[in-house]
Image (cartoon, rainbow, N blue to C red):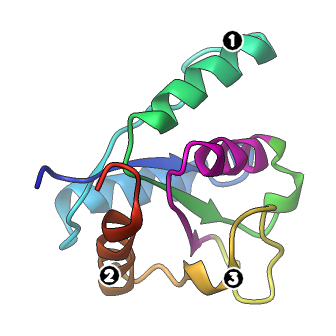
Amino acid sequence: MSEPRAFVSFDFDNNQTEKILFAGQAKNDSPTPFTVEDWSSKSSLPQISWEAEITRKIGATNMCIVLVGRQIKSAGGVAKEVAMALAQNVPVFGVYVGGAGTGSTLPSGLQRNRTMAWDWKLIAAAVDQMMREGKNA
């Protein structure tokens, strides 16, 4: 089996630092069985162009990992990315970041029982589960 590919969805306005740390740790310091690539848009795009680009990128991955911060309910792009993933049968799970926890609001479509602490053993187990149930398995 090839190495799993993950799309990371995050609150651009509030959790960029956590996204950078998450992606960096995934590449260098953790026992992660997946690849994280920065596929976020590098420039401001018209909404329709952004949606087409992100839909294509999510469709080329095995899973979508949502970094759930404390202000995620105001991050409309995250909710759209979760919906795009689910529409393409790309499994989704979440990781609490930036002080968020089990009482934090989740974007529509992200299940509480699929959202966990930032613990690489838990994340690796979730990746394994997503690969077993995903469209690209």
Question: Residue 52 appears at what percent x and percent y?
Answer: 63, 18
Of the pair 12 and 92, the residue shown nearer to us: 92
> Which residues are the magenta region?
77-97
Q: Quadrant of the C terminus?
A: bottom left
Q: Is residue 3 left or right of residue 82?
A: left
Residue at 69%, 82% in the rendered image? 112
Give SS at disc 2: helix
* Furthest residue in direction left, as rendered: 1
Q: Earlier in the sequence, mark 3 or mark 1?
A: 1
Residue at 41%, 36% in the rendered image? 38
Q: Which quadrant holds residue 100? A: bottom right
Q: Between marks 2 and 3, how big is the CA–CA gap?
A: 16 Å
Please, is residue 61 above or below residue 112 in the view? above
Q: Is residue 22 left or right of residue 24?
A: right
Give SS at disc 1: helix
Residue at 33%, 79% in the rendered image? 120
Q: Is residue 86 magenta?
A: yes
Check disc 1 and report the residue beneath it.
49
Of the pair 112 and 20, the residue shown nearer to us: 112
Q: In the image, which disc is placed on residue 112?
A: 3
Q: Is residue 130 magenta?
A: no
Label 2–label 1 contact, CB within 8 A: no
Q: Earlier in the sequence, mark 2 or mark 3?
A: 3
Check disc 2 and report the residue beneath it.
125
